[in-house]
Image (cartoon, grey):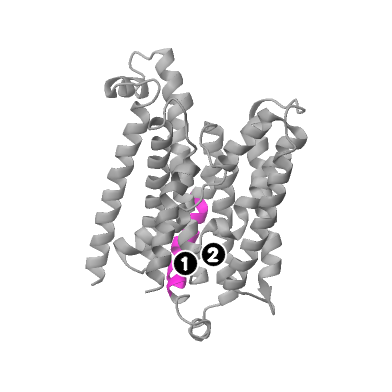
Amino acid sequence: MHRSSSARLFTVLIAGTAIIAVAFYLSLTNGSFDISVADVFKTLLRIDPQKEYDLVVFDFRLPRIVLGALVGFSLGIAGAVIQGVTRNGLADPGILGINAGAGLAVVLFMFLFQGNMTLTGWLAVMMMPMFGLVGGLLATAFIYSFARQRGSLDPQRLILVGIAVASGFGAFTMFISLKMNPSDYEMAAAWLAGSLHSANWKFVITMLPWILILPIIIWLRAHVLDLFQLSEESVKGVGVSVEREKNVFLLCSIGLVSASVAVSGSIGFVGLIAPHMARQLVGIRHKHIIPVSGIAGMAIVMIADFIGKTIFAPAELAVGIVVSIIGVPYFVYLLIRSRK
């Protein structure tokens, strides 16, 4: 049985990697400026490099593709963790209020400082994502404090508090955005919709520490998520420190979501859809669900970004909107299925 599940995991990972490779190829070669496969390879391998190809591949398309893959990977894993901790298959990282907190911080930054700062270089590029990251973490700390009951973290209370706080932050964000000048408002609206339009290599480097550390911590403790599907008393009975493990898992997922939202805006439903796809493909063991959720998240974001920038050309639809168009019907399907 174990050998069969491992073989199934390997097959799913190979298939997922192939889908991602196809999405990578399509995104790199197609757009307002089409590039042939031969020219892409020549540009990547530095064979007879041309300035216009270098600009399109290295400055525009490649960082956008890589950033989309990293964001999708983070959101997919975070969704699997949150659904595992809360024992709620309809939970999504967005309901914890992280997206709303980061959105409020970024809109405040645009309203108060945009156009008034004289920073240059790395700091100028990273200032807005830094505000988003801090906003997401502060919102989570605020929600965390209210979600604790009698000294322990209640997963269902966490979801309810997250929904309430996210609604409040969203209303405040809308109020501030209406006070902005038109150009800043357009920029804020695009960011809040979830967009990879401003992707660059500095954003990619910012994501790497979170991607290299937190998923490994989660995967190494994945067996605890399996135990969380039992009653809390049963988990304590096998010697697991429930509160400590909940805190570790939630802090790791919060770090992944905050880092993603800081560089791409609010992209919803990835953390909802990817874990469900993983469970249908590889079963209920979180040791298998977590990597497959990451791969599924990567594929969803990369394909959605390709659709948004090509299908509606010359206009460009934010990746968050495309994912939502896909995600809403899927969410309704999950709701109907959960009632049966």
Q: Which one is in front, 58 or 221?
A: 58
How many numbered markers are drawn? 2
The earlier-in-sequence mark between 2 and 1 is: 1
Quadrant (top left/top right/bottom left/bottom right) for the N terminus? bottom left
Q: Is residue 290 visible?
A: no
Image x and y of residue 35, in percent: 33, 21
* Residue 87 visible at all: yes
- 81 vs 47, nearest the viewer: 81
Vertical placement of residue 205 versus 36, above or below: below
- The amino acid sitting under disc 2 is Phe
Quadrant of the rendering where the C terminus is positioned: bottom left
Marks 2 and 1 in Cβ contact (< 8 Å): yes
Question: Relative to 15, is 206 above or below?
Answer: above
Which dot marks residue 249?
A: 2
Determine crowd level at label 2: few under 14, some 14-19, many 20+ residues with C-alpha closer than 10 A.
many
Return the residue at label 1.
221
Q: Residue at x 43, y 38 (%)?
A: 305
Say which element carries label 2.
helix
Q: Quadrant of residue 207?
A: top right
Residue at point 25% right, 61% down? 8
Q: Which mark is residue 186?
A: none
Q: Amino acid at mark 1?
A: Arg
Q: Residue 103's spot in the image, x, y percent?
A: 64, 46
Q: Which residues are magenta?
A: 212-226
Q: Which residue is painted at 69% across and 25% down in the image? A: 120
Give coordinates of residue 181: x percent, y percent.
Answer: 72, 30
> Considering only vertical position in the picture, is 162 above or below 148?
above
Distance from the alpha carbon under mark 2 to that under mark 1: 9 Å
How many C-alpha atoms fall within 10 Å of the one at disc 1: few (<14), some, or many (≥20)?
some
